[in-house]
Image (cartoon, rainbow, N blue to C red):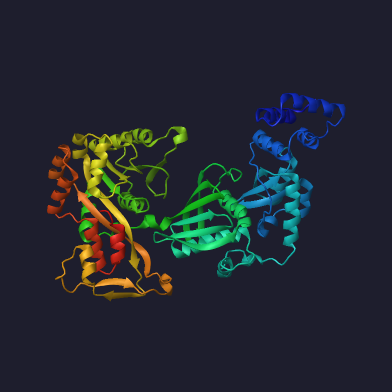
Amino acid sequence: MLNAFDEKLGKILVQQGLISEANLAKAVEDQNMKRDNQKPLGAFLTEMKYVSEKDVLKALGIEFNFPVMELKEIIVDPVVLSLVPEAMARQFKVIPLYLVEKELTVAVADPTNIYGIDALTNQTRCHIQPVLALEREIMAAIDYNYRAQSRPQPQPDEDPVTATDLKRLEEAGKEVSTVKTVDGVFLRAVQEGASDIHVEPSKDKLSIRLRVDGMLKEYYTFSSKEQPSIISRIKIMSHLDFSERQKPQDGRFKLQIGGKEMDVRVSTLPTYFGEKVVLRLLDQEKIQLSLEDLGLSSHNLNLLKTMIAQPYGLLLVTGPTGSGKSTTLYTVLNTLKSEEKNIVTVEDPVEYQIPLVNQVQVNLKKDLTFANALRSVLRQDPNVVMIGEIRDPESGQIATEAALTGHLVFSTLHTNDSVSAVVRLVEMGIEPFLLAPSLLGIVAQRLARKVCSECMENYAPRKAELDRLGIPEETTGIKFSRGKGCPACKGLGYKGRIAIHEILMVDETIRTLISEKAPTAAIRAHAVQSGFIDMRLDGIRKLIKGMTTLEEVLRVTRGL
């Protein structure tokens, strides 16, 4: 007679196609005949070769809703390992794997061993998060890791990642724990001012690249055998299912390192050689910027201040991915927030948390789309509404109507420049007669690398360089800047980034042109006559001021 656990296990094995009903019935009959009822069904099935150990483990994972993990060659951080005495690990056939805040992930062989879980909770004073693993792999991991712990270990005051650890990461053959490896990568990324970390597997190595000032560069390589533990560590920190390797996953976590508080957004993607992970680092200090910190020219700064001072209307920020649109919008919200205003955002995802701002996270699984969330937000008596992105005609229509009914609305759009955003909205199905009176203006921007202030030198541009920018040769006294390369910029000549903008402020003539469905060229021509400064010209002015280089201006304004 099967107990409830074994009965459910048998059903799952059949449902998963791992054993036929006939073979299951025969196995149960064999077990009864042998009077071997004390042995769990899963153990009996594997012993008699009806199913494999991995089949049973998979079914147990489904039955108890526990992740399943392979422990081959896993290296546990000594600090984590020390939480559970070796005798206890062997007694309950468990091994601690990762500690994130007060949650300890522990590999267990028997998911029904509640007594063991309780004992671990009392021992560690942590919340125990079980994952399932094969008993033989757990015992092998216990043998390897506890034996390794008997070697000389760092003292407690050496636990935080140090400059020495960073140096070891760069030297082949140095043993650094998985936790310190990952923490070292994070610290280096913060020190370099990286916006993203790319963890990329290939045939024979794991590469770590950082995106610094918009450019990707390889900083570390590890052997392929270290890939599972490094990626699992990141997934645990992100509260992702580290047993799932065949589907993309998204997560996030907070990180305090290098004197900074960072929000980290994580995306995993299965590739031919394993999971690729990209981590976006969001520096919480960025939301404390003022409008003056955005790098706007005095002309553009005045235009932006004028537009956000309006009681209602639609303001758009456009540009490619990674052009600083979110930073601009968050800075605007930070400027406007007050106890007298109800500010609500709809985002996917929420990147930064802002005091006095009500932020809504889009959740497609719960049918909380941009459009559905916006409808609810407008019933919340808002003064200011920020929509993370206008992605479809429905959200665009609602945003436009909200701007017409007394709300100040901000959003982003993916277009090459400010003027083409008007056409994009019309193409999305927004009626020109609604768009024209609602639109306040459009900010378009790109990010260019700044000249390193430590090694900057001025030079007189050649005729060919002036021609490329459309500057008359007879113009005299112009100096361009470039970086010679130094330790501060690691020989690149660049350090940091600056935004290049153009702002189209909608006046009555432009409203008429929009209503009449005038072509982009007509709108641009009127804007230029009214003092419009396009991105190329804004870039040239910043080039002449020594902020960036000719190559950067041409790179970021190519195609405009």
Is residue 398 among the parts visible in the rendering?
yes
The image quarter containing residue 149 is bottom right
Counting labels gives: 0
Q: In the picture shown, does residue 8 fall above or below 260?
A: above
Residue 137, given in percent of the width and then of the height, sits at 73, 48
Q: Is residue 57 above or below residue 32?
A: below
User: Residue at 68% of width from left, 59% of height from top?
Assistant: 78
Is 534 drawn above or below residue 370 in the view shown? below
Q: Nearer the viewer, residue 480 or 401?
A: 480
Residue name at image x 44 percent, y 35 percent:
364
Residue at left offset 53%, top offset 61%: 185
Q: Nearer the viewer, residue 405 or 138?
A: 138
Q: Name the image quarter holding the N terminus.
A: top right
Quadrant of res 62: top right
Q: Residue furthest right?
A: 34
- Closer-to-camera residue (312/514): 514
The answer to whether residue 258 is visible is no
Residue 412 at x, y = what percent?
A: 32, 45
223 relative position to 347: left or right = right
> Residue 485: x and y, percent?
39, 73
Taking the image as shown, residue 268 lies to the left or right of residue 371, namely right
- Residue 479, by quadrant, is bottom left
Q: Position of residue 65 (x, y in %)?
A: 63, 36
